[in-house]
Every structure is written in C-alpha cells, then in structure tokens.
Image (cartoon, rainbow, N blue to C red):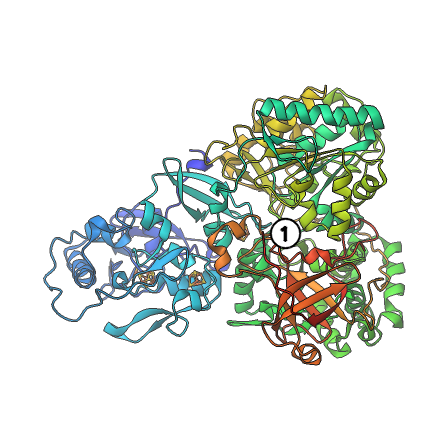
C-alpha cells in the first residue's frame, strides 16, 4: 500500500514512552492468542495491535488513557472484577478475555445508559457512518433501550454555532472528555472543562462562554477527538460525509503539517491532520485545518491576461498567447538592453519543483543569475549565518527533538501565533518541566499562558539582539560555563580562541549591554547560566532575529553560543530557525539565490557549474546575479527592465512601498503569476493564473528540512500548472524545457544536488516525508545535523561586534515600531482574508504602552497616525502593556494598513534582508479615517 492510501488505525492508547518500552517486550495471552507488546503498553493497545477488537469510547491513541466510559472492560485471570483495558498495563503471563457473557452484558448496559440520553436521529445525523457511539452500539449488540426519554435528559439543549468552522451540540455529548483532554494535552490551550458532576456534568468552553468568546483558538483538536456528532465541522453538516482521501501538506507555515484532504467527489469537505505526519503527528492549527476556502474563492483569476501598458485594462487571452506575449517581451528587452536586464523571483509558497524550474529558466533561458526569492526578506541571514558557522544553511533538529530539551530559548519568534503546532509540542515539554527563556521586545503569549510561564523574559529594545547574545555568551565564557571538551573536539581552535578573547571583553558584559538592550544585567546573567549549564538546551528563533541590519551577525551569535556550551549535535539541543512560509527552506535549497545553485553551491564553482551545464546543455554565468533590492534600484535606474515574479506580492510585502512601486512602474515588462490580482500585479503586463496547493503535485520542505509530498486534490483550475507555464516560457524564449510530470523535476534535482540524491516521489510516497540530507536511495534522511562533525568539518566561531542600527529614535520619531503575525491570519492576508478567519482579526491594530498612549492623549480604539521618515498610515490603537514603553507593534495582514509604507530600506549587511523589525516612528491621534482594505 502506498503512503497516500495508508489508513491510521486508532490503537486506543498512546505507545509507551521509550523509557518504559526499553525494559523489553512482555508476553501475554489475549482470547487464547499469544501476544507480545512493549512494556508499558495497555491491554487495550496490545489487543487492538494484535487485531483483537475491544470496544472503546473514551480512549483514543492521541490522548492519555482516562478510563471513564467503562466500555473497554475485560476479564483477567486471577483478578477480581472487570478492569478497564485502557488503563491496565500488560504484564508477563497475563491471561485476558475480551468476549464473555458477563462482559457483553455489562457493555450493553453501559451503552443502554448512553443511548437512553441520546437523540435517536442517526439517519439524519451529520456523523452517521462516522460515529464511534453508533459503531460501539453495533459492536456490543445493543438491540433495545429499556429506559424511555420521559425522565430527566440532556436532549433539546441549544447548539453553539458561534465558531465559524464547527458546531457544538451538547444534546449528543456522552461526556467522555476526549475534547477536554485534546485541548489540554494536544493543543495546550485548556479552553474546555467538564462542569458539574454526575448527571449534571457537561462540557463548557472557558466560563460557559460561547466558543467564539472563549479562549479557544479553533485548532479543531477537540472536534477531531470527539467520537460523536457533538463537535463537528460545519462543512460536514452542510455537505455530508467525505468518501475519499488524498494525503497532502499544509501550504501556510514552515511547520509543514501533513493532512488528509477528505473529499466527496471533487468537493473538499474536511482537512484532517494526519496522525502519521512527521511534523505534526495528527495536530494542526486553525489555518491548515479550516482556512482553505480561499482556494476556490470567486476572486481567483483562472484565465491569463495581458496588456501593453499598465494603465490599460486587462485582456483575457489563451495560455499560448500569454506565454508568447511574455516570452517575446522578455526576449526583446534582452536583445535591446542585454541579457542582464531581465530576471526572476521565485516563491516560498510554491513547491520545490516549481521553484527549481523558475531558477533554471532564469539561469538557462534568460542567460544570467538574476534569480532571487522572497526568502531574501525573511530568512536569508539564516542561510548566511549557519553556513558560516556550521557549514549548511538549515536548522539542526527535527521538531520532536524539543521533547528532550531541558531549557528552551525562544528568541524573536512567537510560536503560538506563527508556528502553532510546534508551539503545542513546545508547551507540552514545558508542562513536563523544561525551563523557558523568552527574548522578545513584546510579551508574547508563551511568556505567560495556561500552565506555562517563562523563567526569564528578556524584554530587549528592538535592534539590540547582538548586544544581548554577546552578553549571554560573555557570561558563559567568564563564568567557566564553556563546554571545553566539546569545543576542543568539534570546533576550530583558532577561531574559538579569538572569539573567547573578544567576547570576554568588558564591553560585552551584561552590565555594558544593559545600556543598549534595557534588559537588567542580573536577568541576563541568570538566563545565561540556565542555558549554558543545562544538560540539553535548545534555541528556536524567528524573524525577530533575521529582519535586522545585523540579522546575519545575530544568527552567528546564536551559533557561537550553542557551540561554546556544547548544545549542538544531539536530541534536545540545536539552533533552529522557525521558518515563516511553508516552503522557505525548500525555495532556498532549490537554488533561488543569485549566487547559489541548488544545495547552496556557489555559481563560481567550476565543477558544480559544469555539472549543471552538462545536464542542461547550456553555458551558465559564473557571476552572481542581482538580489531583489538591486533589481529594484536598477529598475529605477533604467538598467533592469523585465521581471518574472511567481507567487510573491513584492509591492505589499517588501519594505518602503513607495520605492518598490516606483521600481515596478519603471519596468518594460512585468510578468506576475499568482492566485489573485494583488498590489504587484497593478504594475504587471502579463498575469498568469497560479494554482492553489490543492491543485499542486510536488514537494514542500519544512523548517526541519522535511521534504513532504503535496498531492493534487483537484485538477488545476487554470488548466496549466506553474512548472508547465515556466517550461513553456523558457521554450518560447529559445531554450527548450520539458518534463512529463513533477516527479521528473525531482529526479533532476536529485541528480544535481548531493543533499537530495536519494529523494524521489516514489520513495516519499512509499516511506513518508524525509529530512535532507538524503544521501542515497537507501537513506531515510537525517533527523539531526552535525551529530559527529559539523557539515563544514570543525565548527567556526565568528566575531559578532554589536553595531547599533542607523535607524535611531530621536525627538521627532521617539518610538520604535516592530512587527509580527497573529494566529488566525497569514502574512499579507491574501489567503486568510478570503476565509472566515477574518472573524478574529478584521483589521490590524497598533499596540502602544499605556504610558506612551497617555502622553499623547491616545485612548484604546482611537485612530492614530503612525509616521516614520518614510511615510505614514492610520491604524486603531490598542493600549496594552504587552509592549514596553518606547515600543509600538503592529501586524501587517491587511493591505489597507500598508504597514510597509513606514518601513525603511535599511537591511542586513550580509544579505540585504530588510530591517522590518526596527523603524523609528511617532504616533499621534488623528481625525483621519482608519485605512481599510480594498
Ligand atoms: S463533546 Fe464529544 S469529545 Fe467532548 S465530551 Fe462530549 S462526546 Fe466527548
Ligand atoms: S478548537 Fe482547539 S483550542 Fe478550541 S476548544 Fe477545541 S481543542 Fe481547545
Ligand atoms: S501549524 Fe502551520 S503548517 Fe501546521 S496547520 Fe498551522 S499553518 Fe499549517
Ligand atoms: S475506553 Fe476504556 S474506559 Fe473508556
């Protein structure tokens, strides 16, 4: 059976932990059959794994056993009564019986009680055919119910339909508490409780609020766990049960959750997280599970369009006409102004295969290396920094590694909003006792939420990351917390000694750093000791690290600290970028940067370039091409004149909107491929419709380097996939490019890229997603990097001098603006704003500290003018002490907000990644209307 068809069998209780299982297998007899199970397994799991059926209701293998429903009873030789098999561990020599007269009678009695308080509307119930209560009633042979409905019952209770995606019908609830436990154990939100006792017990959200007003974050774990129709997706209620399944991968964030897309004919009914998914193990967030309606939204453009000038209306044309138009215009520009006057931008939203063909088109058909990617504006410093220190541009761990961490440092990341499924796993580890250090200018939810509290919140001023990381490292070095053995064995001697002297200097002490960071030196010292002295300490970071003028320096600072303290190369440690977009890792891996082929190999390397030249049968440029900022400034200068942009809204997401608009307006030919018209396509001459993730065939690579399959759930609504479009443009430009299918593109990637050598669609379909490097056909991939040696050999320490950003606050612009994301929305909102997720975040707001608000006469909800040296916009103020004095914060999900109107062109010194996270601003009350979308 291939992975796409694989059906997960619920074995009732989770597999035992590795410690319990390590004591070896246990042999027992169940219904006369000899069974072997790892120590710590429950009788229920052992029986179900052996194919012996035991009915169950409150048990499911994603949750700890609870033992409340009394349906899974068994008889055990030598023991009194009928113990619950879901809470009874196997023992050597145990003799278990699962089917006896007594058990059948007791089970029927239990079911009779449930059914006597349950509406008997099975035929019209939305869960008919997918209801465990119905199944178990059949399994135990329940034929009639002796108790009528005349007495007290729970029937007729009002439904709660307040959540846009799921409904709660308490009359169908059997109080098994699977929902409550899912919310606690899997999601970690603790939004549900069982109120009352006995007959009066009932499931309530928060303080008996409707779901929409409760703490619920709509992850859907409770809906998935519910064995009845009590909690159920509205799409199932409206459209009926799905009848086929296609396994695929979420297209939102870099967690890369695996899903079973459940369909009825061609209609997508439900996205169910895949329990076998390596990144998510059956969990998801509100975006992946529910916010997929944008894929079939009426705003989608399904036919190609062209126009000679950007002030003309669009003309719908055939694919052939659009491709000819694009190819001719790009060729004409190259002929007139030289081949370096055109270029392309690939997308972290697209598959590896789509990205690979875009960079191939640019290098082989355009004849230059003017290829860049939207990763330029987010994680390019990760690529640079980790390559310099460790030797490869990727996070070191898989997500499950966090289960072994004793201290977790989260820097410049907000996982509960931006990487929610990983955040749930992280919170679970914290509930088990791991310690948390948060370094962030804002009090993110992880600092204090249900059953989670950070030991240290280092609330630094925006733009002072490097001063902070140097101070943390200073403590490790000067307080004898360096792992000398690790450093001696695994790292370069000379670069370490230089770094040790550098970092030990008094200018890097926490006391000196406090002047810049504002973080009390004592807090820094205690946090540094906690991290450095831990058995296993790990670092997770996000765009709050990279999107700075010293983004690359900071990434190297993190790597230095991890190496010096020996927290690298095993479970529970490491340095891990939390990637924003679903395929930002893959887009970088596939050679989207102007200086690198796939696998991060420099274009000037003759041997590498030679291998591409012989495979592609074309001479390739040995000089790096233009980065996005250079393309834009050369466009304004008139040297750069033609651009192909796939799946990125530059005009909305890149900094200094006015500059970007001026550049795009200067182009002679702009080709945009996307799902919807956007801010960038306002300047385009050709619009090529793109496909949603539900139509794609390919792979995405998530933040843990896991290459996951994206399978077409429906045929492309546009008639042509992105890679076919690109091949046709390249061919029309005179460089023939052809593949029969996306699998062939991956075969070419594997042939040309050592880290992908053993990857193929067939292998992923057979064995599931795998983490690169996958060195050959027999390899299953690599969970943890740098285990025995760094990819570059010895780990390299780099000096990380703190250089304050040029973007300073002053009397005119006394506040610092920093930006971030919110759970329900995604980036510039192109997708999520076209779903019911707008229920939670209908507009962006500006968070401002009460003291700063009071000084300016601003009250909560007031319209305010946010202005910087670059521009201004209006927003609603939210007065909150989540931000410190002197700092304001906003999200950027709504184009109307135009947050990038105020951001500057400052960028990382090494990679040009924009400094989105620091802009000097002023905020004033205004009578101007708050800007709206559209
Ligand atoms: S809502 Fe569903 S999962 Fe929760 S207690 Fe009721 S039946 Fe069980
Ligand atoms: S949807 Fe998620 S957060 Fe909301 S109650 Fe259910 S499990 Fe909890
Ligand atoms: S955590 Fe990320 S990948 Fe997973 S469902 Fe949510 S948005 Fe999708
Ligand atoms: S399944 Fe064991 S008690 Fe409910």
Mark 1 element type: loop
Residue 12 in which image quadrant: bottom left
Q: How many marks?
A: 1
For residue 104, side relative to residue 243 (left or right) = left
Q: In this view, does 681 lie above or below 890?
A: above
Q: Is residue 859 above or below residue 55?
A: below
Q: Residues within 10 Å of mark 1 (few under 14, many from 20)?
A: many
The reply to whether the residue tagged 1 has its Cβ within 8 angstroms of ligand 3 is no
Residue 927 in which image quadrant: bottom right
Of 325 and 12, nearer the camera is 325
Residue 433: percent from left, percent from top = 56, 70
Quarter for ligand 1?
bottom left
Of 20 and 487, nearer the camera is 487
Residue 734 appears in view: yes
Q: Which residue is drawn at 58% across and 54% down?
A: 933
Residue 838: percent from left, percent from top = 50, 57
For residue 418, side relative to residue 42 (left or right) = right
**Residue under circle 1?**
580
């Amino acid at each position: 059976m291939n992975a796409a068809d694989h059906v997960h069998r619920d074995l009732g209780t989770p597999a035992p932990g590795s410690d319990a299982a390590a004591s070896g297998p246990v042999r027992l007899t169940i219904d006369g059959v000899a069974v072997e199970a790892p120590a710590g397994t429950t009788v229920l799991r052992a029986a179900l794994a052996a194919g012996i059926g035991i009915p169950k209701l409150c048990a499911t293998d994603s949750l700890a056993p609870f033992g409340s429903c009394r349906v899974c009873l068994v008889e055990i030789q030598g023991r009194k009564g009928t113990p619950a098999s879901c809470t009874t561990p196997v023992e050597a020599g145990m003799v278990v019986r699962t089917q006896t007269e007594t058990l059948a009678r007791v089970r029927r009695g239990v079911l009779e009680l449930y059914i006597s308080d349950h509406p008997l509307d099975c035929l019209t119930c939305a869960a008919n055919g997918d209801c465990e209560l119905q199944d178990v009633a059949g399994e135990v042979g329940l034929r009639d119910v002796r108790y009528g409905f005349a007495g007290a019952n729970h029937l007729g209770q009002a439904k709660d339909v307040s959540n846009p995606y799921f409904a709660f019908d308490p009359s169908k609830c059997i109080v098994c508490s699977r929902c409550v436990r899912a919310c606690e154990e899997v999601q970690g939100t603790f939004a549900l409780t069982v109120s009352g006792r006995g007959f009066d017990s009932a499931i309530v959200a928060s303080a008996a609020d409707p779901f929409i007003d409760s703490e619920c974050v709509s992850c859907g774990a409770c809906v998935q766990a519910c064995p009845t129709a009590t909690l159920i997706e509205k799409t199932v209620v409206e459209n009926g049960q799905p009848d086929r399944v296609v396994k695929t991968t979420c297209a939102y964030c870099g967690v890369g959750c695996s899903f079973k897309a459940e369909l009825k004919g061609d209609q997508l009914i439900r996205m169910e997280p895949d329990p076998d998914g390596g990144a998510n193990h059956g969990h998801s967030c509100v975006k992946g599970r529910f916010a997929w309606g944008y894929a079939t939204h009426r705003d989608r453009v399904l036919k190609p369009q062209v126009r000679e000038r950007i002030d003309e209306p669009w003309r719908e044309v055939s694919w052939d006409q659009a491709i000819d138009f694009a190819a001719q215009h790009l060729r004409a520009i190259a002929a007139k102004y030289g081949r370096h006057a055109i270029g392309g931008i690939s997308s972290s939203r697209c598959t590896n295969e789509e990205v690979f063909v875009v960079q191939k088109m640019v290098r082989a058909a355009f004849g230059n290396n003017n290829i860049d990617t939207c990763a330029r504006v987010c994680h390019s410093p990760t690529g640079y920094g980790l390559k310099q220190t460790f030797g490869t541009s990727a996070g070191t761990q898989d997500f499950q590694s966090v289960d072994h961490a004793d201290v977790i440092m989260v820097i410049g990341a907000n996982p509960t909003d931006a990487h929610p499924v990983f955040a749930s796993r992280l919170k679970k580890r914290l509930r088990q006792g791991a310690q948390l250090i948060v370094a962030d200018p804002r009090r993110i939810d992880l600092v204090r939420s249900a059953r989670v509290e950070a030991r240290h919140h280092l609330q630094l001023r925006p733009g002072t990351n490097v001063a902070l990381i140097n101070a943390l490292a200073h403590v490790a070095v000067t307080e004898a917390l360096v792992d000398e053995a690790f450093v001696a064995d695994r790292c370069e001697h000379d670069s370490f000694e230089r770094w040790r002297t550098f970092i030990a200097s008094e200018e890097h002490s926490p006391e000196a750093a406090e002047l810049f960071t504002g973080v009390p030196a004592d807090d820094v010292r205690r946090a540094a000791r906690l991290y450095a002295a831990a058995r296993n300490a790990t670092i997770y970071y996000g765009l709050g690290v990279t999107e700075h003028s010293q983004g690359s320096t900071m990434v190297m600072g993190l790597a230095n600290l991890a190496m010096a303290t020996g927290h690298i190369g095993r479970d529970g440690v490491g340095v891990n970028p939390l990637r924003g977009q679903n395929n930002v890792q893959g887009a970088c891996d596939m050679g989207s940067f102007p200086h690198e082929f796939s696998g991060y190999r420099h274009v000037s390397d003759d041997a590498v370039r030679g291998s591409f030249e012989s495979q592609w049968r074309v001479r390739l440029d040995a000089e790096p091409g233009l980065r996005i900022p250079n393309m834009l400034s050369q466009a304004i200068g008139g040297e750069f004149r033609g651009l192909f942009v796939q799946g990125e809204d530059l005009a909305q997401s890149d900094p200094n909107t006015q500059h970007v608009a001026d550049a795009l307006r200067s182009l002679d030919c702009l080709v945009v491929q996307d799902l919807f018209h956007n801010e960038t396509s306002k300047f385009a001459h050709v619009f090529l419709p793109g496909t949603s993730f539900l139509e794609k065939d390919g792979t995405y690579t998530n933040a843990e380097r896991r290459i996951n399959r994206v399978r077409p759930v429906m045929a492309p609504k546009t008639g042509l996939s992105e890679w076919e479009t690109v091949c046709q443009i390249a061919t029309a430009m005179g460089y023939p490019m052809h593949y029969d299918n996306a699998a062939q593109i991956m075969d070419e990637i594997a042939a040309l890229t050592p880290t992908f050598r053993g990857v193929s669609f067939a292998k992923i379909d057979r064995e599931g997603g795998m983490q690169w490097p996958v060195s050959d056909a027999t390899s299953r991939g690599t969970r943890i990097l740098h285990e025995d040696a760094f990819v570059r050999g010895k780990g390299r320490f780099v000096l990380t001098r703190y250089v304050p950003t040029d973007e300073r606050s002053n009397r005119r612009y006394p506040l610092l603006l920093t930006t971030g994301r919110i759970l329900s929305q995604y980036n510039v909102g192109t997708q999520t704003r076209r779903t019911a997720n707008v229920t939670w975040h209908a507009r962006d707001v500006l968070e401002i500290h009460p003291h700063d608000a009071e000084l300016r006469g601003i009250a909560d909800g007031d319209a305010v003018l946010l202005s910087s040296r670059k521009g201004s916009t209006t927003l609603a103020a939210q007065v909150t002490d989540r931000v410190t004095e002197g700092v304001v914060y906003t999200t950027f999900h709504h184009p109307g907000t135009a947050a990038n109107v105020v951001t500057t062109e400052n960028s990382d010194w090494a990679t040009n990644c924009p400094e989105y996270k620091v802009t000097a601003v002023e905020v004033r009350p205004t009578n101007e209307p708050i800007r709206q979308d559209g």
